[in-house]
Image (cartoon, rainbow, N blue to C red):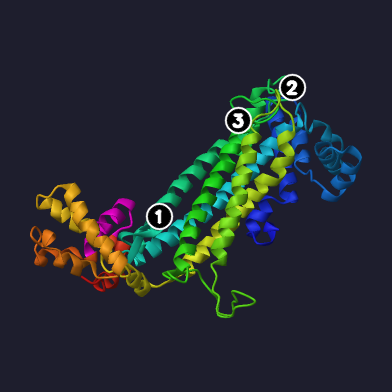
Amino acid sequence: MIERYSRPEMKRVWSEENKFNKWLEVEISVCDAWAEYGAIPREVVPRIKLAKCNLVRMEELLEETRHDMTAFLGAVSETIGEESRYIHLGLTSSDVMDTALSLQLAEAADLLLEDVKALITVLAHKALKYKYTPLMGRTHGVHAEPTSFGLKLALWLEEMRRNQQRLSEARREIAVGKISGAVGNYATVPPEVEQRACQKLKLIPAPISSQVLQRDRHARFVTTLAIIAGSLEKFATDIRGLQRTEVREVEEPFGANQTGSSAMPHKKNPELCERICGLARLVRGYALTSLENVSLWHERDISHSSAERIILPDACLILDYSLSLFIKVVQGMQVHPDRMLKNMELTRGLIFSQRVMLALIDKGLSRQRAYELVQRNALTAWQEDREFLDLLKADTDITAILPQEELEPLFAYHHYLRYVNDIFDRLGLTEAKWKGSVMDMERLPG
């Protein structure tokens, strides 16, 4: 089902045609290596390179052999004739299948890295745009202290940079081949042939293998995809929370003719973000399966094989789709700065409580006493829905230490954004790329 929505490039990577073309590419590279080694005539290699895999014929042979590698070899052999006897010389099925799978995974990783880079670029643009747009910071879902929407987006950007690094490392770890025979001891194919064949395929030979490449490599790859999917879920969940009717600070894109509900015409649901969250659960499940595939009997069994035919293509297809989808969400999201400001003022100044407490401490009061004085006024403001600053001004225990004229400057939003530029500089989001944030800074109250 996910293939319907995935990019054509990623669907091509996991197509049956590409899979068997990769098998053939491995076989031809090994024949080329054997010829360089001197084990087969050099003059047969050009003929072998003309070999094709007829998928229809392979399906017919598969009905007879019930073994995809022998069916593949039979179909290929029919396209070149006598020279086919040199194909698969000294190899076991996993030499071809695992090495070809590495080629597919490397291709898929390259496409996913393109997606990640594109998302980082979009997040950088939006972070710069909303660099100084004030936003209520929430902990436990409750108002904490002001921050900026640009900082939230910059936080996501930096997380995606880490994901880019993780994926690059996972790609390197999976971009390995093995041409080492039935149990990995090179009994039927020398290490030099493996080295030459892998070099032609632009893979690194595994330093040691059994009949298969060890599945900790594949587990690393899939768990990396699960981490990236988890990051997308985190971002999407944040947007879902900000889109709630009571909050309505950010909304995902909603088309002019789009409908949110068959029953309620007014509905604008965060269905794109919810889709991303649901798909992340699938990739997490695949990560667990990949970890269970690490443990195989002795030099190999095939308990991993059936699962990998599902989890490896699907994990790549799902993440590719989710990344593309979230890029569109960020590009087209509707941001409501006025609503952000209105929500910050809901608690009538309570969000400045820490500043007042620290000012009292600075005046010589103990932390415990300062906390006590501020909290009792804060609780009154909560319970009676009154202005926090007015309550503080009327509290003689506080004004005896902190005069009214010193209280008012504490209730300023600018204070919480004074190091935003430092953080952006640390991330390499420089002022040279700043677009339109000055206006947001100017509109701040206080």
Per the image, the residue denoted by label 3 is: 205
Q: Vertical placement of 148 versus 203: above or below?
A: below
Along the viewing direction, whichever of 25 and 219 lies nearer the viewer: 219
- Horizontal and vertical percent position of residue 247: 42, 69
Q: Earlier in the sequence, mark 1 or mark 2?
A: 1
Task: Name the residue type under label 3.
Answer: Pro
Residue drawn at x 67%, y 55% as measured from the top left: 11
Does the magenta segment cover residue 333?
no
Neighbours of disc 1 within 10 Å: few (<14), some (14-19), many (20+) = few
Along the viewing direction, whichever of 423 and 21 lies nearer the viewer: 423
Neighbours of disc 3 within 10 Å: few (<14), some (14-19), many (20+) = many
Report helix, strand or loop for mark 1: loop
Residue drawn at x 56%, y 49% as measured from the top left: 110
Q: Vertical placement of 187 versus 321: above or below?
A: above
Residue 223 appears in which quarter of the rendering? Answer: top right
Residue 144 appears in which quarter of the rendering? Answer: bottom left
Task: Name the residue type under label 2.
Answer: Thr
> How far apart are the alpha carbons under marks 1 and 3?
49 Å
- Horizontal and vertical percent position of residue 372: 21, 53
Residue drawn at x 8%, y 63% as measured from the top left: 403
Query: Which region of the structure is painted magenta?
Result: 414-430
Per the image, the residue denoted by label 2 is: 188
